[in-house]
Amino acid sequence: METTATSEHRTPEVTLKLTFKERLETYQPMLSIAGLIVLLDQVSKAVLRAQLAFGESWMPIDWLAPYARIIHWHNTGAAFGMFQSGGAFFKVLGLVVSGLILYYYPAVPKKDWSLRLAMALQLGGALGNFIDRVRFGYVTDFVSLMNFPVFNVADTCITIGVIVLIWGVWVSELEAKKQMAAESGDADERSVDGG
């Protein structure tokens, strides 16, 4: 398949040669989703910081107290509180991941919506937490569910992005197996007809 600037599947190198309008059309779906995620993430964290002191919690529904609460928490590690005190490393990692997503996104065929959605969710989540790391040196987390580590909107979107990616790969593999079986069946029929 020949790759051109107008084909559905582009190499990252070809994307660099696109006009501004073509780039905008290519990135618009991803940047819209990622931008909405960053907005929701940053607004939710700002409201939390304005309403609760660090370590303070709020339980909007009393009977849910043993299961869920809102708590103002700081995280210097990765999503869900893993690898604490890795702030500088995670700043760099956030930039690298975001850069790779932006670089490879145009190479994903438009029909591969699951990979495109997964990349948009992961970009939005990575940028949301990156902004916190740059501004404060830590990520603000606030959703506490039972004994699960405290998390935020960005963490949730990264996780959903991974789930969508896994699901998309699984569905693609199933479709490829079906297609191979159909092609194998067609070849068997041709050999029977020809013999």
Image (cartoon, helix red, strand yellow):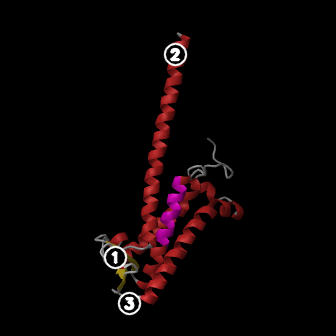
Q: Is mark 3 on a helix, strand or loop?
A: loop
Identify the residue at image location x=45%, y=51%: 167
The answer to whether residue 12 is above or below residue 182 is below
Residue 129 located within the stretch drawn in magenta: no
- Residue that numbered label 3 is attached to: 53
Left or right of 35? Residue 80 is left
Q: Mark 1 points at which residue?
A: 63
Dot 2 alpha-carbon crowd within 10 angstroms: few under 14, some 14 to 19, many 20 or more: few
Real-space CA distance between mark 3 and mark 1, rounded to the nearest whole angstrom? 23 Å
Q: What stretch is highlighted in magenta?
A: 114-127
Q: Please name the amino acid that badge 3 sits on.
A: Ala
Please indicate, yes or no, whether residue 87 appears anywhere in the rendered image. Answer: yes
Q: Nearer the viewer, residue 141 or 63?
A: 63
From the top left corner, tell me how far across and down residue 107 is, in percent: 57, 53
> Can you tell which of label 3 and label 1 is closer to the viewer?
1
Counting other residues with Cα less than 10 Å from the Cα at mark 1, is it few (<14), some (14-19), or many (20 or more)? few
Q: Which residue shows up at 64% across the image and 59% down it?
A: 26
Mark nearer the N terminus (3 vs 1): 3
Mark 2: secondary structure:
helix
Of badges 2 and 3, the one in the foreground is 3
- Looking at the picture, tell me which residue is in the foreground, 40 or 5: 40
At horizontal 39% and vertical 78% (from top left) the residue drawn is 61
Which residue position holds label 2? 191
Residue 122 within the magenta-colored segment of the rendering: yes
Q: Which numbered disc flags the more N-terminal residue, 2 or 3?
A: 3
Image x and y of residue 164, in percent: 47, 56
Q: Is the magenta stretch mostly helix, strand or loop?
A: helix
Alpha carbons under labels 2 and 3: distance apart: 75 Å
Residues at marks 1 and 2, CA–CA distance in whole angstroms: 69 Å
